[in-house]
Image (spheres, coloured by chain):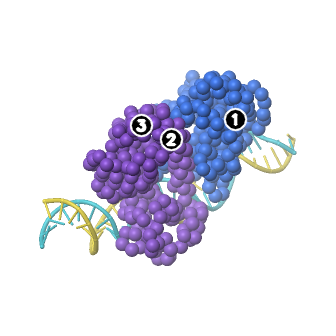
Chain colours: A blue, B purple, C cyan, D yellow
Amino acid sequence: MKKDKHGCDLQSCMLCTLCIPAWKPALAAHRQHLTFKKGELLFREGEPVNGIYFVNAGKVKVHKHWGEGKELIVRFARDGDIVGHRGVGSEMVYPVSATALEAVNICFIDMTFFQATLKVNHDFLQALMMFYATELQESEKNMRNLVHMPVKGRIAHALLNLQRKFGVNEEGYINMTLSRQDIASYTGTTYETAFRIMSDLIQENIIVLSGKSIAVKDAARLAQLELEAG
Amino acid sequence: MKKDKHGCDLQSCMLCTLCIPAWKPALAAHRQHLTFKKGELLFREGEPVNGIYFVNAGKVKVHKHWGEGKELIVRFARDGDIVGHRGVGSEMVYPVSATALEAVNICFIDMTFFQATLKVNHDFLQALMMFYATELQESEKNMRNLVHMPVKGRIAHALLNLQRKFGVNEEGYINMTLSRQDIASYTGTTYETAFRIMSDLIQENIIVLSGKSIAVKDAARLAQLELEAG
DNA sequence: AAAATTATATGAGTTAAATCATACTAACCA
DNA sequence: TGGTTAGTATGATTTAACTCATATAATTTT
């Protein structure tokens, strides 16, 4: 983690666009620009909450761990996204970890100032509430999928999700590369199973790999796999 | 569902306690008192959102369905709890169903008035945001458990959860009765598996049944089952 | 009170996915 | 530049949990 001065442009993230004009100077004074290298932790599950992270650039995975080396990725964040808001609550301890998947650029707001911001900026508070509501819906949908979908359907769902969230390049490859282990952690399965199913999907000509990049060739088939009950 | 006039006392639920005094008359005018019989649906997954339900009395299960007859219970609500807030979002369609588990007493606020309430009552909005944040944490914890815990651990967790949420009577029985099917749906397993594991827990003298009521005899053992990784 | 529906109970068989075991390959860093 | 670690690749084995089948008990409905 590195601190430096220049940071966001004060007009792209959700906080900057929704806060009242009078609050902007305070915001400009309090925000801290942080950078993280690939693999670095923004914060760790169980640590006391120190603030909220606004991603300016880069990709972050948000994950919960369990026992020895097992984890579940609950979300990916990209530029414009908020990370660390799961720490808001009575416990004041992060319930998840966040790890940079590539070089990441953060606009950090400490918790005290964040609380003050909530008090003053009604529109931001409302947007944040809506954001939580959406995340809760997402989370419970994923939860249902985890229970009732077979692994193949979950991987299909995950790939379509990633494509929607991160988009594709000119050749159709998803603008996001993940290790097989991360795919497994995101879909709630083991590395080996994730690997085998990815191989199946390639065999069936539904997806194509180029190095670590994935292109969805047959979105319809993927969508259909989502529906086939377990 | 039945409508009638008398309803909440305007001072116990979260909305009533946190709204500004000036808003109380509007609130009193707009709230509707609804009652539901055991088994009745408050609303169904996929229906357009019409409003928010504040539970005055009774127990409600909130569930998501999948395919033929499969469901996942994501939450139980009791008096003082909010139901239907999962409908808040861009979609304006309930992502879950809610079913009365016993005779239920509801204070209902239609969506338009609820939106207006959010605009005017900053404290309520903030409390609601915190509530969402907590629910999101809960949801993701359950999600992790569903993935990494064996069924026995999940049932142990569920029983401790229910005990904490609903309390116990003089003889130590949880103030909440559930069918085996609901226990299964809550822990993401099948009826048969839930049944077998409940039998195990009884055999091991960790829980005791009296009719449909469950008493936890050995909370320490249950808590330990939660920790044993799958 | 009889019929019908819904919940409980339990054994047997099957299977999806986890675990274990073992190479190979690429990336990293000292 | 060689050594260590992290990711990829795949076969064999095991098992937890699901599915299927069937019986009984308890409610609810008519």
- Residue, disc 1: A108
**Is B64 rendered above or below residue A222?**
below
Q: Residues within 10 Å of mark 2 (few under 14, many from 20)?
A: many
Name the chain under label 3.
B
Residue type indicated by callout 2: Phe
Cα separation, mark 3 vs mark 1, equals: 33 Å
Decide which of C18, B87 is in the foreground and name it. Answer: B87
Can see residue B33? yes
Residue B137 x %, y %: 56, 48
Residue B62 x %, y %: 40, 50
- Dots 2, 3 in contact, CB < 8 A: no
- Residue, disc 3: B114
Residue type indicated by callout 1: Phe
What residue sits 39% from the left and 42% below the top? Answer: B52
Where residue B12 is drawn, which disc sits there? Answer: none
* Secondary element at tag 1: strand
What residue sits 39% from the left and 36% below the top? Answer: B26
Residue type indicated by callout 3: Phe
* Secondary element at tag 2: helix
Name the chain under label 1.
A
Q: Is A109 on the left or on the right of A223, as rendered?
A: right
In the rendered image, residues at marks 2 and 3 fall on the same chain: yes
- Residue, disc 2: B124
Is the N terminus of chain A in the top left, top right, bottom left or bottom right quadrant? top right
**Is A210 rendered above or below residue A230?**
above
Q: Is B157 on the left or on the right of B175, as rendered?
A: right
**Is A129 rendered above or below residue B57?**
above
In front: label 1 or label 2: 2
